[in-house]
Image (cartoon, rainbow, N blue to C red):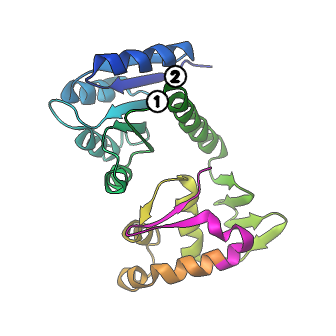
Amino acid sequence: MQQQTILVIEDEQAIADVIIYNLQKEGYFVLWEREGRSGLQKALTARPDLIVLDLMLPGIDGLQICRQLKSDSRTRDILILMLTARSTETDEIVGFNMGADDYVTKPFRVTPLIHRIKALIRRSEAAETAGNAITLHGIEINRTEHAVRVGESELELTPTEFRMLWTLMSQPGRPFSRNELMETSRGEDANSLERTIDVHVRALRKKLGNTGDLIETVRGVGYRFVRR
């Protein structure tokens, strides 16, 4: 198996040293940049599998880096774990809305951080292998068959419900705004859909039965699929 590359963009050397040491122990090839512009350039040239990205960087900040990488077809599939001292729910939501795949606040414990990184990579590998199918917490969704199963039961979902569930399950733990969920359900009257997104989610939860509570409400933002 090819050795995976992780880029650490972190300006505090003591923190970077700890992360790099522990990632190398796990067998990853690790690159380090301590400034925003050089970090962005390294991401564009090295195309790592995952980036540990601090938000407060000299040059350009982590949010700008994340935004640029996720808007570029060459780099948008690179996993990004944001690492920051900002710990409010709003900051976390902003990070996810910029395209971050996970978010860890400082101070952090090293072992859980490494586990989060490994879990991100495993999920990415599983999604790549599965391609058009995802199974989480007993729910299976298959885009090729356009089918959703809970246990032995196949659910009858509308196209809108199907696309919303796929979006939520494809990035468990990531909060999606109502507008983002609306964008995934193009093909219907967008203005009407935005006003009724909560109705679609209620209907989807009802069809999912006992697993419906896996779709969590994120107050003031929208919805997410449970990660744990």
- Percent x, y of residue 61: 21, 38
Q: Earlier in the sequence, mark 2 or mark 1?
A: 2
Q: Which residue is mark 2?
A: 4
Q: Nearer the viewer, residue 1 or 112?
A: 112
Q: Is residue 220 magenta?
A: yes
Is the residue under label 1 in contact with that under label 2 (CB below 8 Å)? Answer: yes
On screen, residue 184 versus residue 121, left or right, reads left
Q: Residue at x 23, y 43 (%)?
A: 64
Q: Residue at x 46, y 22 (%)?
A: 5
Check disc 2: other Cα within 10 Å, few if <14, some if 14-19, many if 20+.
few
Q: Which mark is residue 49?
A: 1
- Element carrying mark 2: loop
Tell me if residue 108 comes above or below residue 68 in the rendering.
Answer: above
Quadrant of the snapshot with the N terminus? top right
Tell me the distance, in whole angstroms, between the alpha carbons under discs 2 and 1.
6 Å
- Element carrying mark 1: loop
Q: Residue at x 27, y 22 (%)?
A: 12
User: Which stretch appears magenta?
Assistant: 206-228
- Callout 2 amino acid: Gln
